[in-house]
Amino acid sequence: MQWTDLKARLLSAGSVSLSGEPADQFIARSSAGPGAGGSGAVFFAMGSHRVKLALDPLSRVEIVHRGNGVADLCFEGTLTRGRLLEPGFHCPDQAFITVTGSCIFNCRYCTVPRLGSRRKTIEEIMGMVESVRHRIGAISITSGVLESIEEEESYVLEVVKHLRIYDLPIGVSIYPTDQTPDRLKELGVAEVKFNLEAATPELFSKMCPGLNYGLIWQVLVRSVQLFGKNRVFSNVIVGLGETDSELETCVKKLTSCGVIPVLRPLNPVADLAGTPRPSAERLKKIFAIHERALAAAGLDPRLAVTMCTNCTGCDLVPGRD
Ligand code: SF4
């Protein structure tokens, strides 16, 4: 089976049961995004490819850890030898840190508002980066919204100012104000990600009450002017109820603006628990659409140095998968 087929199937399954030798050092615990607060996840790698799977003892996918990261993936009657990757913070090769682990908004697919974790101090964040500095190539920052969008932006800017001392590329993904791209650019941030989340404005208003779809588009366009092509990203969730043609329209609109879409298979949690995950067939079909749209716009995900397009754990990424 080719890697893209295998990864599409694994992303559609979404989880794995882990057995064999103790594997604590390989378990990533997430405090950001739709998978936040779960019982952890592992990164299974084959050569330069990788996939991130949530741990679930009842999963139909199994990974047996043989020791020292060597691992066998048992899935659909075949055994594939690979290895487990050690996460930096949240993902391998990066310190991907959630500044504020709570949120005043209530996006229907996200568990962060229910976690109510506190905001990390700048000292804590510096300590986290310091502890993995020897094995990371980038720092990525995301955040919920503690009090207001404006206050969150100011705090994240303060965090970024301190992190510049590490001289690593910094990626930032927060809910923006109309000034966020300019302010991040001024601080020397390398890449930004502002998430559209839904393929259509109608779905967005259903999924993300109180947030502004038009503003995100505006901020994405401004970001490309400032950061350039291949440095601006936007997550769009696959499986919120959009059709393939709506998704294709959204992907093409993003790429023609110079934005690299991150097409994220739905992880059905929070209000969407029970919603089916997208099938492997659909993910492959969308992968082909994504690949064509990027090529037509002259965009190349292999150039990404931070965040999800560099990590590739949770999505099929053209050029990398
Ligand atoms: S793809 Fe993004 S969300 Fe998934 S593990 Fe990597 S950095 Fe985290």
Image: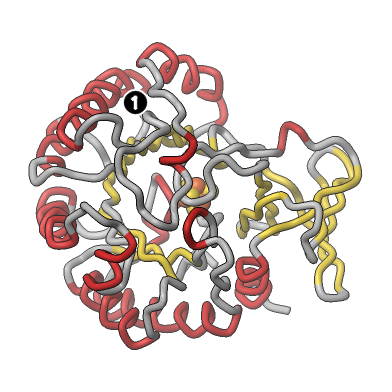
Depicted 122 relative to depicted 241: above or below: above
| Label 1 near ligand 1 (CB < 8 Å) | no
Q: Position of residue 292 (x, y in %)?
A: 36, 82
Classify the position of the C terminus by image quarter: bottom right
Query: For mark 1, what is the residue?
Result: 167
Q: Residue at x 66, y 49 (%)?
A: 43
Q: Residue at x 47, y 77 (%)?
A: 287
- Mark 1 lies on a secondary structure that is loop
Q: Nearer the viewer, residue 245 or 136?
A: 245
Q: Nearer the viewer, residue 144 or 312?
A: 144
Q: Which amino acid does the dot numbered 1 rest on? A: Asp
Depicted 111 relative to depicted 140: above or below: below
Q: Is residue 57 visible?
A: yes
Q: Position of residue 59 (x, y in %)?
A: 77, 61
Q: Quadrant of residue 301?
A: bottom left
In the image, taking residue 146 as reference, residue 49 lies left or right, namely right
Q: Nearer the viewer, residue 169 or 196?
A: 196
Q: Position of residue 274 (x, y in %)?
A: 58, 66
In the image, taking residue 302 as reference, residue 67 lies left or right, namely right
Depicted 235 relative to depicted 40: above or below: below
Q: How is the image coloured?
A: secondary structure
Q: Position of residue 314 (x, y in %)?
A: 53, 58
